[in-house]
Image: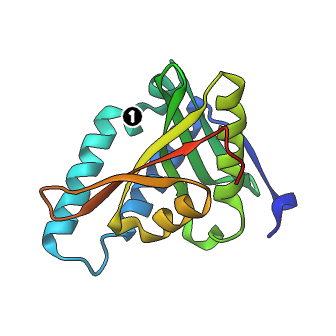
Amino acid sequence: MSKDNFYIRIFNKHDQIHVQDMVISGLLSTAVNRNKSVKDGISAYLKRSLSEDLGNIYDHYFKNGIFFVAIFDGNIIGCLGAEKHSDFTFRLKRLSVKKEYRKQGIAKELLKSIEKWTKERGANKLILGTSEVQRDALIFWKNSGFQVVESEFVESGIEVFSLEKDLNLNF
């Protein structure tokens, strides 16, 4: 598959269940072969996420943000959202690409779409959080110009990272 075979579009309400299931499945797959504490931590995170933003993407993100989906052959294969954090900063959330479509430039294109959209709205910084459980995501973010600005261990023993990217710098 190449860039010519998929496209990025703005999320619509009909995408809710497909995106929700994809994100949950992706996060649950990170718990495979992990200890009970990590599995419990991921389950608690998913429960919290459903009540915060993942359970109603449209109402959450479209107040002061955006949510993009990647489409291949009529199916959603990836997503990424951004919510306004402050006047010049947006927080990225919910990067997910179905396992069979990873390492094909989809996450990179989703990020490009977010960067363009946020810059058009005056943003100069993007921030996000991820964890050691999502190693591939952490590597992706670092390779995309994000820098770790803080890390801490949460109650489940998982190390979580805060990252940021200055949009005025070119990587």
Q: Is residue 132 left or right of residue 88?
A: left
Viewport quadrant of the N terminus: bottom right
- The vertical placement of 36 against 145, above or below, is below
- The vertical placement of 111 against 88, above or below, is below
Name the spot of residue 21 as percent of width and height, x first: 45, 52
The residue drawn where x is 16% and y is 65% is: 157
Q: Is residue 155 visible?
A: yes
Please give the residue where the numbered disc 1 appears in the rendered image: 53
- The vertical placement of 100 against 161, above or below, is below
Q: How is the image coloured?
A: rainbow
The amino acid beneath tag 1 is Asp
Viewport quadrant of the C terminus: bottom right
Name the spot of residue 154 as percent of width and height, x first: 17, 55
Name the spot of residue 83 as percent of width and height, x first: 49, 30
The residue drawn where x is 32% and y is 42% is: 49
Q: Secondary structure at mark 1?
A: loop
